[in-house]
Amino acid sequence: MIARLALLSAVALAGCASSPPAVSTLPVVSTPSEARAAVGRVVRVSGTAVRAKLGDAVDSPNLSVTCPDQRFPDDRLGGPIVVEGRLELTGEYAATVGPRGEVSQGTEAGVPVLVMRPCTVR
């Protein structure tokens, strides 16, 4: 009887053991050429968390990815951050020219912005 209880206890405790965190198998994007090749795919990007006009972004020396639908926690701004999501190139933020030549705020026309939707902080 005692042996049976010991075995059940060991099995129960083994089920409670914590497993190591899952390792992401997503491709890591860190350069503009890697980003262009990965448009439409779910990837991982790391860098510094910043708050910009178009939305929060991940900046690295060679790449900037905007997360327009994700607001990073304030305590993460200025520090390292890793995000995962689907990369897109969009022209939706481009400045427009009105009928009298007035230019709206926005990015340079013809220069797409690299965005991630959805953007999940890891």
Image (cartoon, helix red, strand yellow):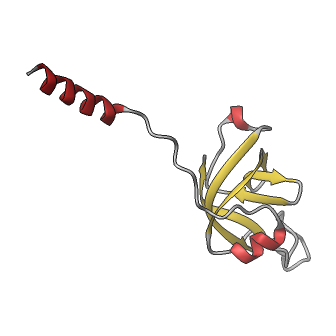
Left/right of residue 92 with respect to residue 40 in the rendered view: right
Q: Is residue 84 above or below residue 88?
A: above
Q: Is residue 106 above or below residue 48?
A: below
Q: Which residue occupies 66% across, 43% down?
A: 72
- The one nearer the camera, 55 or 62, is 62
Q: Position of residue 12 (x, y in %)?
A: 25, 31
Left/right of residue 65 with respect to residue 87 in the rendered view: right
Confirm whether residue 118 shows in the render. yes
Q: Which residue occupies 45% across, 39% down?
A: 19
Q: Quadrant of residue 103?
A: bottom right
Q: Position of residue 107 (x, y in %)?
A: 84, 67
Q: Is residue 31 above or below residue 10?
A: below
Q: Which residue sits furthest front?
A: 3
Left/right of residue 17 with respect to residue 111 in the rendered view: left
Q: Which residue occupies 65% across, 52% down?
A: 83
Q: Quadrant of residue 67?
A: bottom right
Number of numbered labels in the structure image: 0
Q: Which residue sits furthest right?
A: 101
Q: Which residue occupies 75% across, 41% down?
A: 80
- The one nearer the camera, 114 or 4, is 4
